[in-house]
Amino acid sequence: MNTLITQDRLDALAALAKQAVQRVPDYSFVAEIGIYKGGSLKVLADALPDRKIVGFDTFEGLPKEHFTEGEVHQPGEFSDTSLEAVTEFVRHSDHVTLIKGLFPSTAEPYAECTFSFVHVDTDFYLSVKSCLEWFWPRLIPGGIMVFDDYDWPNCPGVKKALDEFGQPIHDTGAAYQAYIIKK
């Protein structure tokens, strides 16, 4: 399946993505940050065949630039992937664009775009925080941001960043996954 995300979380991800795009304009984008091997990106691509999807990843593992004290995972973990491998994995999804590099510095081409759905699977506090800060102003009202590894002991930064953000946090019904909705 090319993912470490459990099936119940993938199912919740697809359901929330469909829900989000039904409520917002067709011109809005869908994004995933933290692609790894592309499994959850493929789920989104299959669930939303008519939506432009952009995926951001270093394709070199967790970034040392976003590592802070207290993180359980280490920089470079999850580096057993590549842009080429993920491109091949999603090759039949013409509506998917992959962007290699450290987010948010790689997001500049999308600065004027709006988003209806964003999946954040970045593990580190600073990575999650940067996603919240960059996407929230660009998220359309009714848009949804889903966070993988919320409240998982190995990713304490996810919960910390999301809790600090101050928006109501909703449970997807699957373990270690949460979301927020822009009103």
Image (spheres, rainbow, N blue to C red):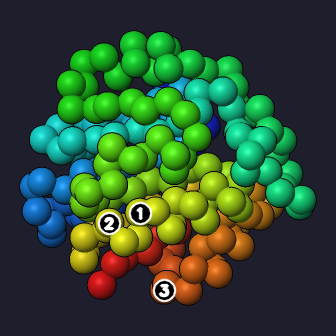
**Picture coordinates of residue 72, whole percent (x, y):** 85, 51
Whole-Å distance between the Cαs marked 2 and 1? 5 Å
Where is 173 relative to 100, above or below? below
**Picture coordinates of residue 31, whole percent (x, y):** 36, 48
Q: Tell me the kind of residue under disc 3.
A: Pro
Instruction: Determine which quarter of the picture holds residue 53.
Output: top left
The residue lying toward the viewer, choosing from 133 and 4, is 133
Q: Which residue is identified by label 2?
A: 138
Q: Which residue is identified by label 1?
A: 135
Q: Which residue is drawn at 31% across and 17% down?
A: 91
Q: Tell me the kind of residue under disc 1.
A: Phe
Contact check, label 2 and label 1, Cβ < 8 Å: yes
Crowding at dot 2, Cα within 10 Å, few <14 / some 14-19 / many 20+, comes out as: some
**Picture coordinates of residue 128, whole percent (x, y):** 60, 60
Q: Which residue is identified by label 3?
A: 168
Quarter occupied by the C terminus: bottom left
Q: Tell me the kind of residue under disc 2.
A: Arg
Q: Label 2, secondary structure: give it.
A: helix
2 or 3: tag closer to the N-terminus: 2
